[in-house]
Amino acid sequence: MNDLTIPFKTGRLAIVSDLHFDGYQRYTLDPIKTWGIEDILWNVDALILECDFTNGPPRNWADVFQCLSAFVPADRI
């Protein structure tokens, strides 16, 4: 993992907690759009994820990062 210096542009930082991504995926929902935070994520310089990315094991985390990288570049998550 590389160190990340903020700000890249604006110094905007978002923190997402308890995403439980696979719970939404089970119902073919996107938690980012469900909660209406896509506009927030489009405008951040970095994203911090905290706690419970998924309900299942860490092997499910790749889906979370793939979804989020549509909004925030992967190297800034």
Image: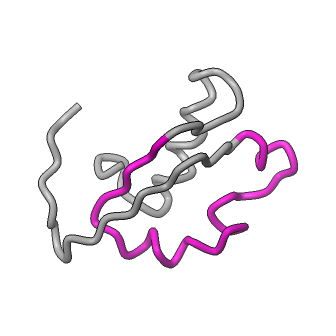
Residue appearing at x 77%, y 49% in the figure: 24
6 falls in the magenta region? no
Residue appearing at x 20%, y 77% in the figure: 10
Residue appearing at x 71%, y 58% in the figure: 30
Identify the coloring.
Answer: one colour
Farthest residue to the right: give it.
27
Of residues 37 and 66, which is closer to you in this image?
37
Q: Does 60 sit above or below residue 16?
A: above
Q: Position of residue 63 (x, y in %)?
A: 60, 39
Q: For the N terminus, which image quadrant?
A: top left
Residue appearing at x 63%, y 28% in the figure: 60
Q: Position of residue 38 (x, y in %)?
A: 55, 72
Q: How many marks?
A: 0
45 falls in the magenta region? yes
State the extent of the magenta-drawn residues as a range.
Answer: 22-50
- In the image: residue 56, left or right of residue 29: left
Q: Position of residue 20 (x, y in %)?
A: 67, 43
Q: Does 7 sit above or below residue 52?
A: below
Q: Position of residue 74 (x, y in %)?
A: 37, 48
- In the image: residue 10, left or right of residue 14: left
- In the image: residue 36, left or right of residue 76: right
